[in-house]
Amino acid sequence: MGVGLLRPGAEPADVLPSAAAAARTLATVEASDIGVVSGEARITVRFTVADDDRAFAVAQHVVATVERLAVTARPTLTRRAGPRWTPVHATPSPTRSPR
C-alpha cells in the first residue's frame, strides 16, 4: 500500500513495524518491506493464512492500523502461486450486500 503524509504525532520509523505487528496478531508474517515506487513510499507485509476470507481480515486490520499513522493509497491483496502474484478479489458474503 502507498503511504503518504504522516498523521500528527506519528513517526516515520513506526509505520512499517506497526503494519507488521498488526498482521502478526492474526497471521504468520513472513516478511515486511518499505520501498519507493514512482516517487511514492510503499509498504509490503507478506503473511500466510489458510484462506482468502482470513487474508482479507488480516489486510483490513493492517490497513486500519497504518491509517491511524499515515494517509494510505491503493492497498492491494495478492496471492502467490508459484512465481506469480495475482490479485485476490473479495467475494460477497451472504450477510453483506454486493457492491
Image (cartoon, rainbow, N blue to C red):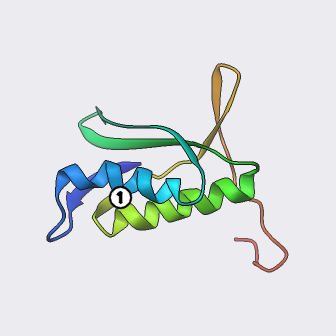
Q: Where is residue 63 in the image (x, y as percent from the top left)?
A: 45, 61
Judged left or right of residue 11, residue 1 is right
- Residue drawn 33% across the image and 48% down it: 16
Judged left or right of residue 71, residue 55 is right
Q: Where is residue 29 in the image (x, y as percent from the top left)?
A: 53, 44
Q: Around disc 1, counting alpha carbons within 10 Å, would you say few (fewer than 14), some (14 to 19), or many (20 or more)?
A: many
Judged left or right of residue 10, residue 47 is right
Q: Which residue lies furthest to the right in this view?
A: 94
- Tag 1 residue: 72
- Eyeballing the image, is 41 above or below 35? below
- Residue drawn 36% across the image and 61% down it: 66
Depth order, front residue of 64/29? 29
- Residue drawn 37% across the image and 43% down it: 43
- Residue drawn 53% across the image and 48% down it: 76
Q: Position of residue 9 (x, y in %)?
A: 14, 69
Quadrant in the picture for residue 54: bottom right
Q: Quadrant of the C terminus?
A: bottom right
Judged left or right of residue 38, residue 45 is right
- Eyeballing the image, is 83 above or below 22? above
Depth order, front residue of 76/54? 54
Q: Which residue lies furthest to the top in this view?
A: 83
Q: Position of residue 17 (x, y in %)?
A: 33, 50
SS at circle 1:
strand
Quadrant in the picture for residue 87: top right
Q: What count of labels does the image hold?
A: 1
- Eyeballing the image, is 39 above or below 8? above
Amino acid identity at mark 1: Thr
